[in-house]
Image (cartoon, rainbow, N blue to C red):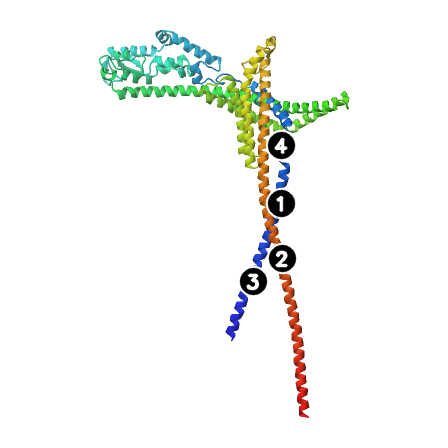
Amino acid sequence: MDSELDLFDKKTEEILIKNIEELDKLTELKIEIDNTLEEALNDMNTLKEEYSAEQTESLIDLCKDNVIHTIVGQFGIASLFLEAQDGGNVTTTHNFEKGITSSEADRQKYNAMQENKQKDFKEIRKSAGYDEKIHKMHREDAKKGRVAVVDEYTGKTISSNRADIDHVVSANEVEFNVKNNLFLSQDERVKMATDDSNLAYTKDSINRSKGKKTMEQFLDKERPEGITNEEAFGIDRNRAMGKDKAARQKMAKTVNKAAFKKYSSELLISGGKDAAKMAAYSAIGVIIHDFALAIVEELKYMFKNKEQSSFKELFFHFKNKMGEVMNELKNKWKEIFTGSLEAGITAFLSNILVFVINLFATTLKKIVSMIRAGFVSLCQAVKIITTRPNGISQDEANFQAAKVLTAGIIGALSLGLSAAIEKFLQSIPGLQPIMMFPIPSFGKEKKTVSDVIAVTLSAVAGGLVSTIVLYFMDKCRSAAKKDKLQIQMVTISGVVVQCKVSQSWFAINNAYDFFAQMAIEEIKNVEEKFNVIKSSKDENDKSLSELDDIMKAF
C-alpha cells in the first residue's frame, strides 16, 4: 500500500514539474515576443526617419558648389601650378630615344648623340680616347718583352706580334647606346668600354673581322666558304660568350647605378617642387573656394534686397559676411594644413606615376595634366574606402568613392578641352595680343591669359557635366534606397503583426485561465457548501434515528 502511494506521489510530482516547465517556456516566449515587438517598432521608426530624410540637393545648389570647386581645384587653376610637359618631369629612356627630354641638360645629351651619329666613328673613337688604354697596354707588353699571350676567345697561345686587344662589347655599341648616352657622359662611356672586364687579347684577324658586331652576331655570321666565323677561327663559343656576358653584366651594373642616381635625384627634386607648390595652392584654394561661395550668396542677397535696403546696408551686410568667412577659415586652420599636406603628398606621388607610365609610353602635355589631376581623385576615393568616415556604412562609402572617381574622370577629360579652347581664343581676330599676354607663373613654361581662361572654361564645363551626372547618380541611389527602405518596412511590419497576434493569443489565453480559475473556485465553494449541507443532513438524520430509537423504547 505504501509503495502504491509513493508511486502516486512521484507521478504527481512529475506532472507538476512538467506543468511548471511549460509555464516557464510560455513566460520566456512572452518576454521574447515583447522584446521583438519593441525592437521592430524602434526599427520601423528609424526607417521612417531615414525615408523622410532621403532627399537630394537641388541641381542649382550642386552646380554652384561643384563648378566653383572644379575651377579652384585640381581640374582648374591648380593644374597650372604643376609642371606639365610632354614626357613628364623626368626624361626616361623611352622618351630620350624619341628626342623628348625634360631638361636642357638632357636635350644637349640627345643633340650630341645625334651629331655623333653623323660623324665618322673613327674620329669620335680617336678624340674620345677609346683606344688609349689599349695602346698603353701594348707598350707595357713590349716593354716587358712579352712575346706570347693567350687568345681569350680560342684559348690558344698566340704571338704578341699577331695579338690585338679587342673591346668585347664594341666601342661603337657603347658609344651609341641610348641608355649610355642618357645616364653617362662620354668620359664615363670610354671608362666603361675600356674596363678590364671588356678588354680581351685575341688574334688580330679575329679582332678585325669582329669589328662593331656583337659577339653572337660575329660567331654566327656565315663566311663565303659556307662556314661560320666560330668554325673558321676555331673559337671556343662558351669561352667567348662567357667573356661577353661578364662584360655586359658589369656594364649593366654601371649604367643601372647611374640611372638610379639620376632618376631618384630628379624625382625627388621635381616631385618636391610640385609637392610644395600644390601644398601652398591647396591652402589658397580652400580660401578662394569659401570666399567665392560667400560672394555668390551675397550677390544673390543683394539682388533680392536691392529695393528694400540701401547701398550702405548692403555693403555692411557683405562686410560682415566676409568677416564670418574669415573667422571660419581661422577656426579650421588645422584642417586646411592637413589638407595641404595630403595635396603635397598626392602631387609627389602623381609625379612618380607619370614617370612610371613614361617608362613604357610617351605622355603628351595635356595627358600629363589629366593623369595627375585624375590621380588626386583616385587617392581621395581610396581614402574614403579604406578609412571609412564615422557614421556611414561601407556600402555608402563605396558609393561616395564611386562619385569621386566619376567626377575625377569627367574633370580629367575636361582638361583635354583646354588645349582646343586655348587655340580657339588665340585665333579670334584682334584678341591675339591680349590672349598671348604673359602672366606671373611657376616653372619653365610661361603662362598666358589664354591659358588661364581656357583652363577656367574647361573647368566650368567639367563642373557642370559632373554635377549633372552626380545629381542623377544621387537620384538613382536615393530611389533605390527608398525602395529598399520600403521593403524593409514591409518586412518589419510583418514582424510587428506577428508579435501583435502572439500578444493577442497570450491575452486570450490569460483570460481563459482567469475564467477557468474562477469556475474552479466556484465549484470548490459549491462543493464546500454541499459538504456542509450533507454533513448537516447526516447529523439531522442521525438525530432523527436516535429519536426514533428512543420512541421505540417507550
Q: At which x and y percent is residue 426?
A: 57, 11
Label 4, label 1: how far apart the Cα atoms are: 25 Å
Instruction: Categorize mark 2 by other alpha carbons within 10 Å: few (<14), some (14-19), many (20+).
Output: few
Q: Label 4 belongs to which residue?
A: 56
Residue type at mark 4: give it: Thr
Q: At which x and y percent is residue 329?
A: 65, 26
Q: Label 1 belongs to which residue?
A: 42
Left or right side of 58 for 305: right
Q: In terms of sequence position, does the residue under pointer 3 or pointer 1 come before the other?
A: 3
| Residue drawn 62% across the image and 38% down it | 51
Residue type at mark 1: give it: Asn
Q: Label 2 belongs to which residue?
A: 508
Q: In terms of sequence position, does the residue under pointer 4 or pointer 2 come before the other?
A: 4
Callout in the foreground (4, 3): 4
The residue lying toward the viewer, choosing from 407 and 232, is: 407
Q: Label 3 belongs to which residue?
A: 19
Residue 446 visible here: no
- Label 1 SS: helix
Residue type at mark 2: give it: Ile
- Label 2 SS: helix
Left or right side of 308 for 252: left
Instruction: Categorize mark 3 by other alpha carbons within 10 Å: few (<14), some (14-19), many (20+).
Output: few
Q: In terms of sequence position, does the residue under pointer 1 or pointer 2 come before the other?
A: 1
- Label 4 SS: loop
Q: Are marks 1 and 2 in contact (CB under 8 Å)?
A: no
Q: In terms of sequence position, does the residue under pointer 4 or pointer 3 come before the other?
A: 3
